[in-house]
Image (cartoon, rainbow, N blue to C red):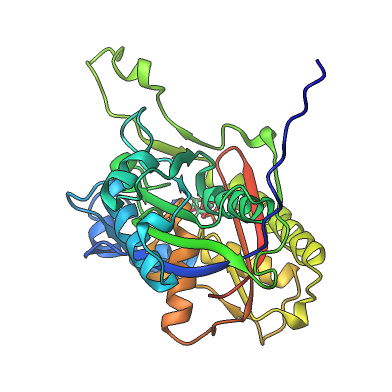
Amino acid sequence: MTGTIASRPQGSEASILGLGVYRPERVVSNEEIIERIDSTDEWIRSRSGIENRRFAGDETVADMGADAAGKALAAAGITPSDVDVMIVATSTGLNQTPSVAAEVDVRLGTGGAAAFDVGAACAGFCHGLALANDMVRAGTARNVLVIGVEKLSTFLNRDDRSTAFIFGDGAGAVVVGPATSSGIGPVVWGSDSSGLAHIRQDLPWDETFAQPDGPRWPYIEMDGNPVFRWAAFEMAKAGLRALEVAGVTVDRLDAFVPHQANMRITDAMARSMKLPDTVAIARDIAHQGNTSAASIPLALDRMITEGQVRSGDLALVIGFGAGLVYAGQVIRVP
Ligand code: COA
C-alpha cells in the first residue's frame, strides 16, 4: 500500500488541425420522400428547412467514416501512423461488436491507435471533441481523430411521416492535435433523462425476432414536438454557457454551428441567444437532412467551402439528441 503511481507529463493546448467529410452521392428529394408519406414538399421545407438529403448506397458506416477521416488527416498534414486515438461517434453501426472505430482503423491503417465508439446520438461529435481536447491537454494523446458518421437510412421507416423526411446519411471527421493556444473551449454537457423515450429505437433487438408476424427490422421513432421545444429553449441556454466558459461574448463569435436537427430549432436558438447578424449560421440541413453525429462537421465544412467562415474564426458548436443528451463548446475553425 506504499507504492506510488506515476502520472504522464501534461500535454499542450489543443486545436482542430484538419477537417474532412463524406457526402453520399445519391441526393434524395422531398418529392421522392412524399411518395410514401402523406406530406408535401412545402410542409417539409417550411417545418424543417429540408430540401434534400443524401442516402448512402452500399457504403457502410465504417466506409464513410474512413473516407472522411482520410481527408481530415490530409487536411491536417499528418499520416495515419500519427494518430494515437480514434473516436467514432455513431448510432447506426450494424455490428454490436467490434466497434466502428476498430473497423475504421483497419481501413486507415494507423498501426495500433486506440479506437473506440461514443454513443451519444446527435451529440456524439461534440462529446468526442471534448474527450479529444482533454486527451491532448492531459498528454494522453498527441493526435486524436474524431469522426461523426451515420447511415440513418438503415433505420428509417419510409412510411412514418414523423421521421421519414428528417434523416440523412454522411460523415465528418476532424484531427485534434497540439497547438500553441487553445482552439477548443471547455465543454458544457449534460443530460435530461425525463426525455429518455422521446427519440428511440422502436423495438429492442431481442423483440425484433419475437414479433407475431415474424422478425421485423427496428426503426427510429421520435416525439418530434417535445424534442423541438426542449432543443429550442434548453439548448440556447447551454450554448450561452459554452460561450461564457470559453470567455467569448456573442459579439466576438463568428459562426454558430448547431446540430442540424431542424432549421426552425436553429433559428429559435439564435434568437434566444441574441446572436448578432454578424454571426454566420450553419444551414447544411437544407441539403443534407439531419445526419445526427455527422451533422456538425458536415455543416462546418459547407460554411468553409462556401466562404462563410475562415480559418481562425470562432464558432460555437452544440450537439443534442436522444437521451436526451447534449454537449457544446467554442472552437477555432481549422
Ligand atoms: N407532413 C405533413 N404534416 C405533418 C407531417 C408531415 N410529414 N408530420 C406531422 N404533420 C402534421 C401533424 O399531424 C400536425 O397536424 P395537426 O396540427 O392537424 O394536428 C401538424 O403537422 C404539426 O405537427 P407537429 O408534430 O406539432 O409539428 P412540428 O412543428 O413539431 O414539426 C418536426 C415536426 C418533426 C419537424 C419537429 O417537431 C422537429 O423537427 N423536431 C425535432 C426533431 C429532431 O430533430 N430530432 C432528432 C434529434 S435532435
Residue 154 percent coordinates (x, y): 29, 42
Location of the N terminus by quadrant is top right
Q: Nearer the viewer, residue 253 or 176?
A: 176
Q: Residue at x 41, y 72 (%)?
A: 77
Q: Nearer the viewer, residue 180 or 272?
A: 180
Q: Residue at x 43, y 58 (%)?
A: 82
Q: Quadrant of residue 183?
A: bottom right
Q: Residue at x 71, y 53 (%)?
A: 10
32 relative position to 244: left or right: left
Q: Residue at x 29, y 59 (%)?
A: 67
Q: Is residue 60 visible?
A: yes
In the rendered view, tell whether residue 32 sits above or below residue 164. below
Q: Nearer the viewer, residue 185 or 227?
A: 185
In the rendered view, tell whether residue 316 sits above or below residue 150. below
In the rendered view, tell whether residue 182 sits above or below residue 132. below
80 relative position to 142: left or right: left
Residue 329 percent coordinates (x, y): 67, 61
295 relative position to 256: left or right: left
Q: Nearer the viewer, residue 146 or 309?
A: 146
Residue 98 percent coordinates (x, y): 35, 31
Q: How many marks?
A: 0
Q: Report the residue that reaches farthest toward the left.
A: 58
Q: Report the residue that reaches farthest toward the front.
A: 3
Q: Quadrant of residue 4?
A: top right
Q: Is residue 159 visible?
A: no
